Image (cartoon, grey):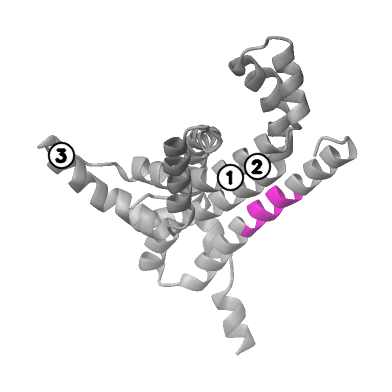
Amino acid sequence: MLGSLRESLDLTLFWEYRAILLRGLLENVYIFLGGAMLAMILAFAIGVARLSRRWTVRVLSTGYAELFRNTPEYVLLIWVYYVLPVIFSRLLATRFNFSPYAAAILALGASYSGFMSETVRAGILSVPREHTEAAMSLGMSKWMIMRRIIAPQAIRRMLPEALNQFVSLFKATTFVSLIAVEDLMYKVSMITVHEMRPLPLYTGAALVYCAIIVAAAQLIQHLSDRWRRRGWA
């Protein structure tokens, strides 16, 4: 029985298909980078909007953040890929489609922008009020205060939490095979159909993801410790 289990978990098969599987892993990386960039842009816009003096801006931006923070990535991927093109097609009176890659980046970027917007808001609020008042007394404009006083301090404070959210975003890229993105899990499922040996393939994929995420978590912990020792966070 143990011999049969060892044979079924033999990762030699996973290694034989390493070139194909590496291409799939690179798709995960590309989607992660695109989603992370979109999430950061949206998060800064929504995070700042949540601090607006205008009630309507605060309500709309808070509603956006809560919507995407509380919608599962699985549901959002399906909705963006299948439902959103139907809505656009009817509004534009023409056929409209998202590619699987565009849908994955849009869905994951929007989803994690909700989480990151709260990090941005908290980072801005953590900057002492006295620093802003001192800059205003020197006649600095609101834009200059944000760019030269608030943003540098806020970014240092929000980086540890933001990096943790990036790790979660990378983990979420494992869902993109649901909409036919040819990522690592998609490649594994296709090879499994051909080889009929799912255990070594899915075990190998799990180990690869685990190794990447553990390495990223250790790097984040190391950077966070350095920031704390320097008094940056």
Which three-letter amino acid code belongs to the residue tagged 3? Leu
Residue 21 higher or lower than 47, as above or below: below
Q: Main secondary structure of the magenta part?
A: helix
Residue of label 1 = 118
Residue of label 3 = 91
Q: What is the residue that sits farthest to the left in this orientation?
A: 93
* Residue 214 lies within the magenta run: yes
In this orientation, which residue lies closer to the viewer: 126 or 120? 126
In this orientation, which residue lies closer to the viewer: 195 or 102? 102
First of labels 1, 3 by sequence position: 3
> What x and y, as percent, mark residue 63?
43, 48
Tell me the mark number nearer the camera, choosing from 3 and 2: 2
Residue of label 2 = 122
> What x and y, as percent, mark residue 14?
53, 61
Instruction: Give the structural element (helix, strand or loop) at label 3.
Output: helix
Tell me the mark number nearer the camera, choosing from 1 and 3: 1
| Mark seen at residue 2 | none
Q: Which residues are magenta?
A: 210-218
